[in-house]
Amino acid sequence: MGRTVMSIVQAFHQEQESWRKFRRALTRDDREAFDRLFEHARRHAAEASYVARPTPFEAVVMAVLLEQEKALAEIRSRLDKLEAGRLDKLVPSRVEGLEAGHLDRLEAGRLEKLEATRERKPDEDPRLAL
């Protein structure tokens, strides 16, 4: 007697194979991104094996969405730290001879310029003048 139900890894592989023609039509960069999506899915194969779904593609999509959400949360966190002027938590205390305090002051200056640009009305912004 053999297996009557294919494993989730086999199902993921079969799903990826069904997209082979689509993948072939993509550019090289897009193919690499496409392959990463299925890598995300395989990373969550154990979790997907607990879900009894008629189509494995649903598990693939949920795994990809989960990884995308985690990446987005990390980006938001880093952006919040930058906007708060906490550059020293993102970089080592010494970068190319500069101390973290110098980097904070540099970043604060950039943020002040950005805020000043945001506060300008379009007719006051020299970049938008005709």
Image (spheres, rainbow, N blue to C red):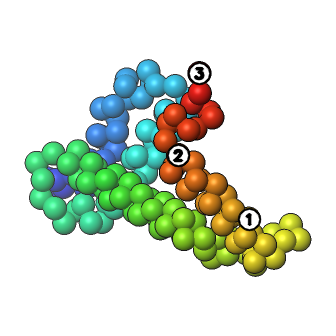
Q: Give 3 or 90, whichever is nearer the viewer.
A: 90
Answer yes or no: do the residues labelled 2 and 3 have beta carbons within 8 Å?
no
- Residue 11, labelled with which disc? none
- Toward the front, the furthest residue is 124
x and y percentages locating residue 80 in the rendered image: 49, 67
Q: Give 98 or 50, whichever is nearer the viewer.
A: 98
Which amino acid type is marked by label 1? Leu
Question: Residue under circle 3?
Answer: 130
> Which residue corresponds to the image point at 23% horizontal and 45% vertical from the top-left?
57
> Which residue corresponds to the image point at 29% horizontal and 40% vertical from the top-left?
15
Answer yes or no: do the residues labelled 1 and 2 have beta carbons within 8 Å?
no
| Cα separation between marks 1 and 3 | 31 Å
Residue at disc 3, secondary structure = loop
Residue at disc 1, secondary structure = helix
x and y percentages locating residue 93 in the rendered image: 76, 78
Residue at disc 2, secondary structure = loop
Which amino acid type is marked by label 3? Leu
> Which residue corresponds to the image point at 44% horizontal and 21% vertical from the top-left?
25
The first of marks 2 and 3 along the sequence is 2
User: Does residue 57 appear left or right of residue 69 in this picture?
Assistant: left
User: Does residue 33 appear left or right of residue 97 in this picture?
Assistant: left
Quadrant housing residue 105: bottom right
Question: Residue under circle 1?
Answer: 106
Which amino acid type is marked by label 2? Arg
Q: Quadrant of the C terminus?
A: top right
Q: Nearer the viewer, mark 1 or mark 2?
A: 2
Quadrant housing residue 51: bottom left
x and y percentages locating residue 55 in the rendered image: 15, 45
**Relative vertical location of residue 55 with respect to residue 96 in this rendering, above or below:** above
Q: Nearer the viewer, mark 1 or mark 3?
A: 3
Question: Residue under circle 2?
Answer: 120
